[in-house]
Amino acid sequence: MISSYLSKAVRSAATEAGYSLDGPVSLETPRDPAHGDLSTNVAMQLAKGAGKPPRQVAENIVAHLKQGLDPSRIGPPTIAGPGFINFMFQPALVHEGLQEILGAGPAFGRSEWGSGQKVLLEFVSANPTGPLNVVSARAAAVGDGLTRLLRACGFQADSEFYVNDAGNQVRMLGESVKARLLELDGKPFEIPENGYHGEDVRDIARAIREAGLEEKLREEDAREGGAFGQWAVSFNLARQKADLEQYGVRFERFFHESEIHSRGLVKESLDDLRSRGYIEEKDGALWFRSTDFGDDKERVVVRSSGEPTYFLADTAYHREKHARGYGHAIDFWGPDHHGAVPRIKASMAALGYPADWLEVVIVQQVNLRRGGQLVDMSKRAGNLVTLRELVDEVGVDVARFFFLMRSVTSHLDFDLDLAREQSDKNPVFYVQYAHARACSVERFAAENGVDGAQADFSLLKEPEEMTLIKELMKLPLAVEMAVRLREPMRVTNYLTSVGQMFHPFYHKHRVVTSEPALSAARLRLVNAVRQVLGNGLALLGISAPEKM
RNA sequence: GCGCCUGUAGCUCAGGUGGAUAGAGCAACGGAUUUCUAAUCCGUCGGUCGGGGGUUCGAGUCCCUCCAGGCGCGCCA
């Protein structure tokens, strides 16, 4: 890697010049290409301690640096501005980069720095009481994207969906279904106060009726209760799975909350916390002393009725994750649950796990925009937009790309009119079109007998070719940054910038020309563009069409 | 009242660990195609980075404070 080579060279040059440099040598790509390909600010950092002007420090470092650099790869370092030392890549280095991309092929952008560490990602985890909404759609796109990216970086990443199939809500769903069954018969019916009023509950009632299951369920329900609720949960979950499948998101596991209870893990967790001294009784209930770990109030874990709370079950679930040997867990939660983060982190700390073992990423809300107006998605308004409706309207690629264009922590405005538009206004197609265009050039080259096998890269020296290759070389960095920051958006933005360099190159320079050698070299560059765009899109779960 | 997120061009948003003259898309306007995909390209217009303090060689970025919007503060899940 060129940056580690340079940082070593700078470090030893600084030492030889008599400066003591603690901390890493920062190398970054200057905003302005005229300032070189990589730049370091060490001279400014050292200036104060050395009691000399930054530019003079830079002079001293550069004087020693010249011996350590291979002039055929890195041009002579220059000093600029307040004391930056700038490095320019020589064509030979850039050509080596191109060779590296082509040699790695589908593996380009992948790395091993995760070294097989086990990570568990939990996302969506929507209640099985209805269809998936657009917030789930966003979480699914981000969570799945990050799972793919972690794997590309050598982590053993698994994805999981937690099914809240226990508790009060399932019973309320069952009661709501029963009410809708009465409605089907034209009888008087009443949906419970905390019940589910959505149209989808009518679907469930009709499905029971059509499958001829009503009698059977009534008997079971009379015997042990909850039959309608359980059936409805299965029905909803099957739909959610189908929607996610269509959306290109597949989970390693759907973990049912009921399993936490049936395996006795809730009691185990309670006992564990109690033996560690964090449980106390008050007002007939059991409380977890989460304030010991920075939460602002203590939390009930067992109600005075004897029933465990959702929080205790969730603690038990995360304890189970830890028991499965995951060295790190990442949860994606909706914005309405951010208040619960301190207590779950507190319970993890109480169980003795490292402070950063559980990481909770809050996926911010989604606003839909149609006709310039925000769509009211409140439940009362009744026009909840589902993941399925969204995908049916704009397609999988557009939906995923739009969710991955924005920072996870930002509220997102999803413009349905723009998303539905099959035109140049839609940013998704910009990247896909670049890929299709590259494929098209490859086809044309093949038809005209251009063969890149023996290409001489030294023929690539146009500015557009150089900047394009330099950008292509940055895919691994974009992937790494996306993983470090938990922001798949980094890759989306990167791919857009590749397009912004490939399209101008295409316009200015013909690939297939009357010069066979040049044609071969440029064809290999196009191969690399296609590879980088294809690899990047695959990491985001977005298709890379060969024709558009 | 407390906590979390957000505030950058008319709109939607980017801006690795603080770096050099703050960027992109859309919108508006003007151009480009006898040849590999015009879903493209080139150009123009557009900014008190919410306000005010502070930290330092340097702040959109860090700290404090105020303002505005969103969300959350249950023996619900």
Image: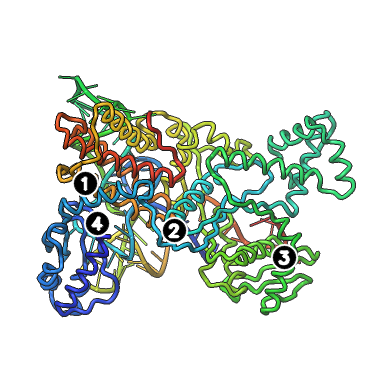
Q: Answer with mark 2 or mark 1, whichever residue precedes in sequence.
A: 2
In which chain is the residue bearing label 4?
A: A
Kindly identify which numbered label has been placed on residue A154.
Answer: 2
Residue at x-position 80% and y-position 43%: A228
Check if mark 3 and mark 4 are on a common chain: yes
Q: Answer with mark 3 or mark 2, whichever residue precedes in sequence.
A: 2
Q: Amino acid at mark 2?
A: Gly
Instruction: Name the residue beneath numbered marker 4.
Output: A29
Instruction: Name the residue beneath numbered marker 1.
Output: A467
Q: Amino acid at mark 4?
A: Thr
Q: Nearer the viewer, mark 2 or mark 1?
A: 2
| Quadrant in the picture for residue A207 | top right
Q: Amino acid at mark 3?
A: Val
User: Residue A128's x, y, as percent?
Assistant: 68, 46
Q: Answer with mark 2 or mark 4, whichever residue precedes in sequence.
A: 4
In which chain is the residue bearing label 3?
A: A
Q: CA distance from mark 3 to mark 4?
A: 51 Å
Please give the count of numbered marks on the rendered protein: 4
Q: CA distance from mark 2 to mark 1?
A: 29 Å
Q: Nearer the viewer, mark 3 or mark 2?
A: 2
The colour scheme of the drawn protein is rainbow
Kindly identify which numbered label has been placed on residue A266.
Answer: 3
Q: Nearer the viewer, mark 2 or mark 4?
A: 2
Answer left or right for B10 relative to A190.
left
Q: Answer with mark 4 or mark 1, whichever residue precedes in sequence.
A: 4
Check if mark 2 and mark 1 are on a common chain: yes
Q: CA distance from mark 3 to mark 1?
A: 57 Å
In which chain is the residue bearing label 2?
A: A
Check if mark 4 and mark 1 are on a common chain: yes
Q: Answer with mark 3 or mark 4, whichever residue precedes in sequence.
A: 4
Q: Answer with mark 3 or mark 1, whichever residue precedes in sequence.
A: 3
